[in-house]
């Protein structure tokens, strides 16, 4: 049995955590914490969210079957990268550029979570009821 989707999300979570930590270190070193919201979203969705996706796909292998999990992975990354870029621009005082990017990316992340919910509910609904 392959755990490639789980491995994908687990590896991605490490990369997002490192990016979020690097941003946090940069803020501390520069004593400019203006990107705290960007840092928080990157750590929450990138590190914690991707780790949780990895665990679900590992513990419930049926959730990794079909095209929907691949779409979920694409939306997760596009949404997070877009949100991070949009928030970074927004908090760098480039509101006109960052705000619409963050807004569209937020909708992508919402769709991502709704899709993940569908995947989980479909997979867990197939389980046999306890005797």
Image: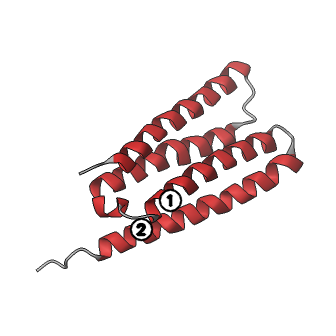
Residue 101 place in picture, x, y as percent: 76, 52
In the image, what residue occupies the spot 69% across and 27% down? 27
Q: Is residue 16 left or right of residue 98?
A: left
Residue 94 place in picture, x, y as percent: 87, 42
Residue 52 place in picture, x, y as percent: 41, 51
Q: Is residue 15 left or right of residue 87?
A: left
In the image, what residue occupies the spot 42% across and 44% down? 8
In the image, what residue occupies the spot 55% across and 48% down? 45
Q: Does residue 61 sit above or below 16 in this rendering?
A: below
SS state under label 1: helix
- N-terminal of the pair, mark 1 or mark 2, is 1
Q: Does residue 8 sit above or below 99 in this rendering?
A: above
Query: Does the residue at mark 1 contact the one at mark 2 (Cβ under 8 Å)?
Result: yes
Q: Quadrant of the C terminus?
A: bottom left
Classed neighbour count for the residue bearing mark 1: other residues with Cα under 10 Å, few (<14), some (14–19), many (≥20): many
Q: Is residue 117 left or right of residue 96?
A: left
Which residue is labeled 2 in the image?
119
In the image, what residue occupies the spot 50% across and 67% down? 115
Q: Is residue 34 left or right of residue 9?
A: right
The answer to which image quadrant residue 19 occupies is top right
The answer to which image quadrant residue 31 occupies is top right
Residue 25 place in picture, x, y as percent: 62, 24
The residue sitting at the top extreme is: 29
Which residue is labeled 1 in the image?
72
Classed neighbour count for the residue bearing mark 2: other residues with Cα under 10 Å, few (<14), some (14–19), many (≥20): many
SS state under label 2: helix
């Amino acid at each position: 049995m392959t755990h490639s989707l789980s491995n994908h999300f687990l590896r991605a979570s490490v990369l997002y955590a490192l990016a979020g930590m690097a941003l946090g270190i940069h803020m501390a070193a520069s004593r400019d914490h203006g990107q705290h919201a960007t840092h928080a979203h990157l750590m929450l969705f990138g590190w914690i969210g991707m780790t949780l996706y990895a665990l679900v796909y590992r513990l419930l292998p049926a959730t990794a079957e079909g095209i929907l999990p691949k779409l979920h992975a694409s939306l997760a990354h596009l949404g997070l990268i877009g949100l991070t870029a949009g928030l970074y621009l927004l908090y760098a005082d480039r509101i006109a550029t960052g705000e619409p990017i963050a807004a569209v990316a937020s909708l992508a992340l919402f769709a991502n979570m709704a899709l993940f919910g569908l995947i989980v509910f479909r997979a867990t609904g197939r389980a046999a009821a306890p005797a």
